[in-house]
Amino acid sequence: MRLYSTNNKNNIVDLKTAVLNAFPKDKGLFMPCQIDKLDPRFLSNLNQYSLIDIAYIVSQNIIGDYIPESDLYKIVYRAINFPAPVHMHDAGISTLELFHGPSMAFKDFGARFMAELMSYFLRHDDRETTILVATSGDTGGAVAAGFHNVPGINVIILYPSGKVSPLQEKQLTTWGDNIRAIEVDGVFDDCQSLVKEAFLDNSLHEKYTFSSANSINIARLIPQSFYYFEAYKQVMDLGKDIVFSVPSGNFGNLTAGLLAYTMGLPIHQFLAATNINDTVPSYLSNGHYEAKPSVATISNAMDVGAPSNFTRMKHLFGNDSSTWNNMKNIVSGYTYNDSKTKIAMQEILKKYDYVADPHGAIGYLACKDYMLTQNKNNLHCIYLETAHPGKFSATVESTIDQKLKLPLRLSEFLSKDKKAYTCSKQYKAFKELLMTI
């Protein structure tokens, strides 16, 4: 498998280099040089395959023979060992539950696959690798769970102070061992900028061998494509055109869906559903991309004003004068404020007896609004429920006026002690901290 940098198509590397280095020195992002279509017979018979089998076939289609078949199957088998069920609301709307992994968020798919892939690539390497990752909420917890006590790998998680839920913070800061957390006095975009600057700082390379676990790492995107196939499999017998509504922040999740689409999965439409951080919906509306300072909302994992993966989205649609027209034909943008999000959570509970988290509620709203403008009889819309509602218990409970029972995988964190370094959003202070920990 060969990958190029989005800033220089002549900067071509192999998969190991792309996974372990994650961020090209030219500040681009790695993309596959070739994305092959899957066998139509496989796609038309998806309902005959298990999730693990789907994950293996899809990953092999992207990776090719770069990793031997038996080794790749072991990577998939160890990483993707939890379900991704579709929960039907009615004939027109359902939700894909992506919270059945260890950290109870969709990031488990990417984090666990990446941990197995990195372990495979580093099995003969004597030098330790440091995963440097910024999180707006769920990425950090999934990465911590995926990499905890993995030999040869240390993890440093940056998160914005006061901008993640209390339970998310516990999932970031209570692991110890090879997992360390840094609480940054800023927003997610500041954390992301610090990570990118550290990657490009040659003076740090004597102390650290860096890699990233953010969705800038191609190893995150490959496994996130798996569950689009898995969801499609579960509804294909409806005989309808399938729409995916994707709650979006850094847009890795939607980019992974577009990767599945590029491989031939017959998705009718994608809905880019955001909170008021509407950088991409604005672009889809007017063709003008303008990164903005992020604004805090109750759907905090989506509080991103400069989504990194927008660059990959452009490349999947040609990255030329036709990009906007090509993209808006398959991706529609929707944006909602906190008030509408809360009303949606209440509506989902009343109408379907289902508790959604704030991110999933935004996906539901986009489904609902899109279906109102279309022939609903021919469509089925799946919104992604990206995290267990218990991760946002204070917001959810006050909104629906109902007490949640937390799963043990979440409640066990509440009694653990937070351990985190603190840092300003200035790179100089961050670098000084890195040199001492």
Image (cartoon, rainbow, N blue to C red):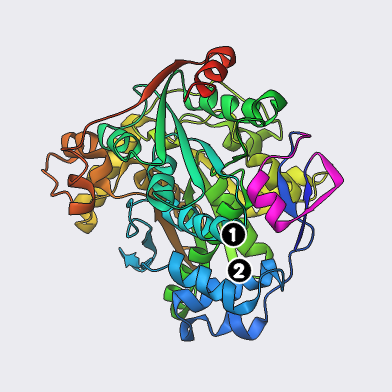
> Residue 333 sits in which quadrant?
top right
Give 71 or 61, whichever is nearer the viewer. 71
Could you tell me which residue is drawn at 63 percent across and 42 percent down? 309
* Mark 1 neighbour class, 10 Å CA radius: few under 14, some 14 to 19, many 20 or more: many
Name the quadrant containing residue 88. bottom left
From which residue to which does the magenta span run? 7-26
Mark on residue 222? 1
Amino acid at circle 2: Ser
> Residue 98: x, y in percent?
38, 57
Q: Which residue is drawn at 53% across and 13% down?
A: 429
Give the vertical position of 55 relative to 404 (above or below): below
Q: In the rendered view, would you say 211 is above or below 52?
A: above
Query: Between marks 1 and 2, how big is the CA–CA gap?
Result: 7 Å
User: In the picture provided, is 219 more to the left or to the right than 231?
Assistant: right
Give the structural element (helix, strand or loop) at label 2.
helix
Residue 87 place in picture, x, y as percent: 32, 65
Numbered label attached to residue 329: none
Sequence-wise first label, 1 or 2: 2
| Residue 144 x %, y % | 40, 45
Give the side of residue 3 with respect to residue 57, left or right. right
Closer to the camera, 249 or 222? 222
State yes or no: discs 1 and 2 in contact (Cβ < 8 Å): yes
Quadrant of the drawing holding the N terminus: bottom right
Q: Could you tell me residue 78's position as x and y percent? A: 44, 68
SS at circle 1? helix
What numbered label is drawn on residue 59? 2
The question of residue 402 being in magenta is answered with no
